[in-house]
Image (cartoon, grey):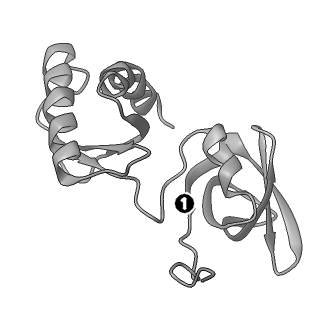
């Protein structure tokens, strides 16, 4: 997480949580001249379009008052989705045993991308299994991590 994303998280978490949602994470994307602030929210009951609109309205007010981003920007509020990004160490634990896609800032064993099964985490290291080979990845080097959707969704027991 960049310094600006960390600042935005600290700034917006109280507002989002006071509304009854979980602030899952924030991405600051800067293509071209106008950056995009993407805020991911979650709730036990799921997230609707109305939830996103309500949070967007409140978050927009906070950003207008605090002005952490100079100039114009685009604000997007979304649910994390089924292939959710993972932002914080605690978010990895529920996905042990699941498929993940991890990109690193610095290579480990000559590679920066690891797509495999998350077999463990201790908050500092992620252990990912790819073709029965385990790779220990430093959490601080993660550029982007995503939990991949299960392929067997909808095929539950009857």
**Identity of the residue drawn at 63% across and 81% down:** 157
Q: Residue furthest top?
A: 65
- Residue that extends furthest to the right in the rendered view of this protein: 133
Residue 49 falls left or right of residue 128: left
Name above or below for residue 68 compared with residue 99: above
Q: Residue furthest front?
A: 158
Q: Residue at x 16, y 47 (%)?
A: 50
Q: Quadrant of residue 24?
A: top left
Percent x, y for residue 39? 32, 42
Q: Position of residue 52 (x, y in %)?
A: 22, 45
Residue at (55%, 50%) from the top-left corner? 86
Please tell me how many numbered marks the rendered image carries: 1
- The C terminus lies in quadrant: bottom right
The residue at the point 34 percent across, 30 percent down is: 20
Establish if 128 lies above or below 21.
below
Q: Nearer the viewer, residue 88 or 68?
A: 88
SS under mark 1: strand
**Label 1: which residue?**
146
Taking depth in this image into account, of 62 and 114 the one nearest to the observer is: 62
């Amino acid at each position: 997480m960049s310094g600006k994303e960390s600042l935005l998280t600290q700034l917006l978490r109280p507002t989002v949580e006071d509304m009854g949602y979980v602030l899952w994470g924030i991405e600051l994307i800067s293509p071209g001249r106008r950056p995009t602030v993407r805020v991911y929210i979650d709730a036990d009951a799921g997230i609707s379009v109305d939830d996103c609109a309500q949070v967007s309205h409140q978050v927009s007010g906070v950003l207008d008052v605090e002005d952490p981003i100079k100039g114009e920007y685009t604000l997007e509020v979304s649910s994390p989705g089924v292939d959710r990004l993972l932002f914080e160490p605690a978010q990895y634990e529920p996905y042990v045993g699941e498929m993940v896609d991890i990109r690193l800032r610095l290579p480990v064993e000559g590679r920066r991308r690891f797509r495999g099964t998350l077999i463990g985490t201790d908050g500092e290291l992620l252990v990912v299994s790819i073709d029965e080979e385990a790779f220990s990845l430093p959490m601080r080097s993660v550029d982007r991590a995503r939990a991949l959707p299960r392929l067997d969704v909808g095929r539950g027991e009857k």
